[in-house]
Structure formats: C-alpha cells, structure tokens
Amino acid sequence: MSLLEVSNLHISLRTQDSVVKAVRGVSFSLEPKDTLAIVGESGSGKSMTVKGIMKLLPKAGRVTDGKIVFDGTDITQFGERQMRKLNGSEISMIFQDPMTSLNPTMTVGKQIMEVLHEHKKMSAQNQKARAVELLSLVGISSPEKRFGQYPHQLSGGMRQRVVIAIALACDPKILVADEPTTALDVTIQAQILELMKSLQDKISTSIILITHNLGVVANIANKVAVMYGGEIVESGTVDDIFYEAQHPYTLGLIASIPKIHEESVTLKTIPGTPPDLIDPPAGCPFAPRCDKAMKICHLRQPENKQISGTHRSACWLQHSMAKQAAEKEEHHE
Amino acid sequence: MSEVLLEVKNLKKYFQVGKAQTLKAVDNVSFQIYKGETLGLVGESGCGKSTLGRTIMRLYHPTDGEVFYEGKKISGSVSKEENHECCRKMQMIFQDPYMSLDPRMKVVDIVAEGLNSRNSSMSRGEREMQVVRLMEMVGLQKEHIGRFAHEFSGGQRQRIGIARALAIHPEFIVADEPISALDVSIQAQVVNLLRQLQDELGLTYLFIAHDISMVKYISSRIGVMYLGSLVELAPSGAVFDRPLHPYTQALLSAIPLPDPRAEKNRSRIVLEGTVPSPVNIPEGCKFCSRCRYATDECKKSTPQFRQVEEGHWVACHRYANQ
C-alpha cells in the first residue's frame, strides 16, 4: 500500500473577478522511502498541489475535486482540527525561505520544543534533550549553545538546518520540502542536500521535494513528476525523465539548462510563456509553445499514457496514430 | 589583445557599520575589461560583486582606487560634461524586474525616460518610433507600448529593463543578476537575447551572477570573488577545465548537475562552515578558514593576485612559485 495516494486533485483559487484553476487533475503516489521531486516553472501548480494535500491553501483556495489517501486513511474531507494532528507529526514541511519561516522573537530551542509539546506531550526536560539531539542530528555544531540563540544570530544555511530539525522533531512519515535550497548559495545548497540525503538514510522518511532546479532533482530524487499548466505532463523514475524523456516540455526544460562541461553554443529555449490558468486551454496546456504540436493537441487534452512500468506521459505523440497524423498534416501544408 | 575599455585599479569600497566597524565590501580589486567582451563575475551572496558593479557605475563613491573608461578617469569627482558622457556610455540592468520598473509609468515612458533627458527637443512621434524600434529589438510586441509594467511576466519585464538600458546607445552594460529572478526556460531566453544584442550592437558586458553555469554561456572571461576580493580571473574555458583556486574548485564541485548517473558517482568538495563576516575578515588569505590546503603561511600573509599562466590570474600561495 502506498504511503500517500493522490488521485485526480483539482484546486481552484478565487480572485476578485475570476477563478484560477491552479491544479487540474493531478494524480501520484508516494511509497515509503521515496524521494519524489515535483518540478515545474513558477505558476505550474507545484506548490498548490502540496498545500492542497496539507490543507494549507490560502483562504481563496479550495480543493474542488479528487481524493487524498494518507497511510490508508482518506484525508480529503479532513477539517483544520483533524489536519493539525497530522501536520507537524505525520507530515511536515520545510519552507523555501529560512529567513521568514522562523519566529524572530523565540530562541531556536524553544521553537523546536513547541512542536514536541504540541504533538508528543513530553516533559520539559525530555523536550530539551530531544531538541539538542535534533540540532546535532542536522549538523549544527555546539548544539547546547545554539539552543539558546535567536534566528538572527544564525546564517542562512544554519537557519535552514533549524527548520529541518523542527520538521523532523516528531519523526514524520512524509517530509515536504518546498524549494528548500533556492534561497541558499550553491556551496550551502550542497551542504543541505548532503544533509537531507543522510537524514533520509537514518530515519527513513519519504520526501516530496518541490523545485525548479533539475540539478537538485538529479542529486536527490528517485522519482520525478514534471508539472506544467496545473497538470503532471510526465512522470517516472529519475532515469526515465533525464535519459528517456518523451514529453516535449520535459525535453525543452532539460535542453535549456546550461551544461557546464560542454562548449558554449546558443542555449535552447522554449519560446513563449506559460498558459493563463483563469481560462485554461481546451487541449494540451503546452501545445501553444510546442514545436511538435498537431491539430488535435489544441483541441483535446491528451490521455496520461503509460510508456513503461514506471514512466507516464500526457502527450498526443504517445498515441498510436500520432505518426500518421503528423505526416498527414505535413502533407497538407 | 584587443583594446581595454574599462580598467579598475585597486578599487576599495568600505562601509561604516556601527561605531568603529568597517565592512570591506570591495577590497583592493583590479582588473580590465576589453572592448566587445563579456566579463562574468561570480561569487556567493555578500561577496561584494554587486557593490563592485555599482561602484563602477558610479552609484557608490569608491573609498580608494580608480576606475578608468577608455583611459579616462571616471571615479571620484569629475566635471559635469564628463559625468553626462559616462551616463550615456554606461548603463545598468537590474536583478529584480518587479522592483526596477516604476509601476505607475507606461512602458513607453519607462523606455523613453533616458531619451527625454538626453534630447529634450525630440518630438512625440519620433520618440514613440524610437521606443517601438527598441521594443522590437528586445522581442516585445509594439502593441504593448501603452501597458503598465504589472501587465507583463517576469521575462518580459526584464526585456523592458534591457530596452530601457539600450535606449541611449550605451557601449558598456553592467548586468547585475539579470536572470536570477526568472524561471529556467525564461533565463535561457534572456541570456540568448543579451548575446544576440551584443553581436548586433557591439556591446561590452559586465555580467554579475551567482549561477556560474549560466555565466559560462555568456562570458568570454570569468572572475570569481570571495569576501570582497577577486580570487581567480581567467578565460571561461580555463575556469571550468583547470580551476586553480581552491574556492573556485569547491564552487564548481557544488553545482548539482542535471545528470542523475553522474551525480551518483561524483565526489564532491563540500566546504565546511560558512563565509566569515566581512566586518572582521581573518588575517592572511581570506579563504584560509575553509580551505583544505591551508598552511601556516596562508594564515599570516595575504596572497598576491598574480598571473600564473597567460591570462589566468589567481590569488593563492600554492601557485606563488609559478
């Protein structure tokens, strides 16, 4: 049984005079010890998807359809109270910006103890011991001293370690990391990625990693879901995505990263900009920017087709008739 | 060697913080930029790369040292005419396309602001024609001339910023992290646009960024900064194939590659600790507290920034005898 099973998730956001369909039919599953990376550009719906799962959507947001099953329990209809028991203990989250996700008026030790107090009902003494233990687990030197310090006394990398310590305080089954290294420098990013990998080995949590950096994905993930225009357009193992990618968007994304060990030629780009999700296109969301687009792509949404045991792609090119149709259209022109 | 366009000599920019503390943001930096090239400047946040760019652009007064443009001194106090001339020849593109455009101005006014201040006699129609030409040059639709900045996406806004910088035909452009606020596929679009404009207009760029792999695509030479000083400067191929300074080596090794198989077998130099505060910089080599080759000599004396191969400069004691 999967640890987390999301099927056909739809999320809408109300704005002043319109509705943004931010997530449109997302399905995926997470097994124990998996690291699933959700990649996509800003506005592709990757953050909204996990916020929808954790019931942390902004006020204007609502899950309009779909089913979320966590560890055998259907949590789709869970209210805030029920969710509060899960969040922080069973599922916890690391946010992008370590500068703003900590409370500036509390010592870091207190902030870790707060989670333990809420979920574990430990004695104050045990809480403190556990907090110090967690600080040393995430690689903070002299944890007793750091325990009494405030966030502003720590560097960005250290703060992100504290955020990770808080997230891990109750041994969660799933750790959701929303762009955990985007605000950090590359050398610090390397430290944090090493830390997350070693922690996963030690305490065997599943990780959902949201990022737009494909280098980070290659480094840490074993499964990848590529999102575009509120949908998962391609998913599979890291090898499927990096070496056997089928969807034109995934291919374009990989081609637009500069390769540091190749001679510099003009970078490949994807022309145009992402679709407007207030009025999403009837067909494939990527069709207007796709150089392989056929007539059907603009008219009807492609089916999410199984390519191999682990690999799926939502693209009309996977259809058995695609080759004939493309040739026919070429002939027509 | 081609002609030197801009020369920076022993440039220093210190800021006073608190009562008796000095933050050495740029500390004794010297280099040259040749006509028509792109010099990439990389380093982690707080290393002083933006301060360096801004000091060259005369947005800050240098504490010490000089900047020469085509052999003429442009730092410190200059005459009004010279100042005017500098402003025309040098322009800047900023990092955040959301903050660098006035939300209450239409695109036509943003792009034409420079034109107005240069040439007040220009007629309305002529001005508009110029703006349309610029917008087409950077790949924006001319129908959008009357829109406000918030009606554009991040990549399009950065194009507006570029059009504004190009309005008065500059020769030299300082681009301060022009792509870091953009998505990957949009970053590639903007980098390609900058390269294409360079070919068409013969521009010279100082390209500041923290993403060293993107810098490689656009730069002919790359300078690496650490805590206010240049630690390495070389043709971009050499920086990637034969990095000499231990910091450059660590920086390159820290970049995660978009190749899972290579990532699995890669041995990485993970730097311990974090960058020391630029307020009290350790004595000797600035990098010695995190360097795996550090010796006693490194803790005592500051290494000279010297040329160890043709065009390859490095500040490290390990190459002192070459």
Image (cartoon, coloured by chain):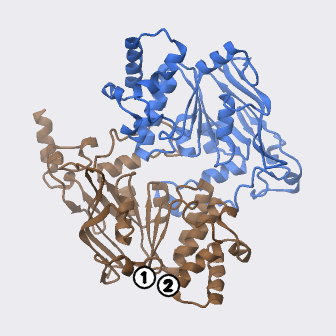
Chain colours: A brown, B blue
Does A112 sit above or below residue A326? below
Residue at coordinates 83% horizontally, 40% vertically from top-left? Answer: B304
Secondary structure of residue under mark 2: helix
Q: Callout 1: residue from which chain?
A: A
Instruction: Inspect the image, locate mark 1, and give the three-letter code of the amino acid beneath it.
Output: Lys
First in sequence: mark 1 vs mark 2: 1
Which residue occupies 28% across, 42% down?
A: A289
Callout 2 amino acid: His
Give the Cα separation between the discs numbered 1 and 2: 7 Å
Q: Residue at x 23, y 50 (%)?
A: A280
Residue at disc 1, secondary structure: helix
Question: Residue B283: x, y in percent?
Answer: 85, 51
A306 horizontally vs B10: left or right? left
The answer to whether residue A240 is visible is no
Q: Residues within 10 Å of mark 1 (few under 14, many from 20)?
A: few
> Which disc is residue A85 wearing?
1
- Tag 2 residue: A119
